[in-house]
Amino acid sequence: MPRSAFRADAAAYRSAPDPGAIGETALFECKQSRADFLKDAQPWHAAAELLASLQQRRRRMESLLAIHRPHLRRGETLFPEFDALDGGEADHASYRRLLREIRRCQAAAGEKSKFERMAFYRYANALYLVAPDDIVDESEIPPGWGWLVGDGSGELRVARRPARHETPPAQRLALLEKIAAAAARDSLL
């Protein structure tokens, strides 16, 4: 399991019926507003495709800037045509706008695709979105995720069952250790 900047709102572990076997794990992501849901529901692959096209545009623009503004070359190689461009010095509005768009897209590809990444890397055997039905429609629930809906009395009902993710035992054990470490840290406060 790759290291991740994502933090689940809640995690659970259920012991295996066989002694010595590693049990099942579940992660829960709780959302209270539509904006909070949409922030983590960006499609990872779509953002990555857009990022690739933006990077291609950046390379094209830098090659044109190198021709039309040779003073932006760094002068670090024997042949000027192989010099890197010092884009930070470029006073070019379109280039700066493109760099801002690339940074925004990188954030979307990395930080705003929490649901898709957690499912892709199979962080747990079951993944649940916990959200009221007035902020998310069932068609928007990410693939492989279950959906728990509150009924107003504090009880949760399963509106959609999650797909079972085959997660390696070592990964489940690592999640159990993180749950235990968090519980120990919280109990010491």
Image (cartoon, rainbow, N blue to C red):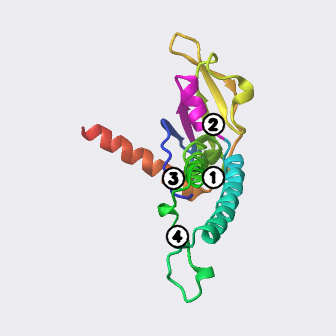
Residue 21 in the image: x percent, y percent?
Answer: 57, 53
Q: Label for residue 41?
A: 2
Q: Earlier in the sequence, mark 3 or mark 1?
A: 3
Question: Which quadrant is home to the N terminus?
Answer: bottom right
Query: Mark 1 — residue?
Result: 121
Query: Mark 4 — residue?
Result: 72
Residue 185 in the image: x percent, y percent?
Answer: 31, 43
Q: Residue at x 61, y 43 (%)?
A: 113
Q: Residue at x 54, y 43 (%)?
A: 15
Of labels 1 and 2, the one closer to you: 2
What is the C-alpha distance between the residues marked 3 and 4?
Answer: 37 Å
Q: Tell me, yes or no, whether the highlighted magenta stretch contains residue 39.
A: yes
Q: Quadrant of residue 163?
A: top right
Q: Residue at x 37, y 44 (%)?
A: 182
Mark 3 lies on a secondary structure that is loop
What is the C-alpha distance between the residues marked 2 and 4?
Answer: 39 Å
Mark 2 Cα-neighbour bin, 10 Å: few <14, some 14–19, many ≥20: many
Q: Label for residue 180?
A: none
Circle 1: residue type? Tyr
Query: Mark 3 — residue?
Result: 4
Circle 2: residue type? Ala
**Residue at the right extreme, as displayed:** 139
Badges 3 and 1: C-beta atoms under 8 Å apart? yes
Q: Earlier in the sequence, mark 3 or mark 2?
A: 3
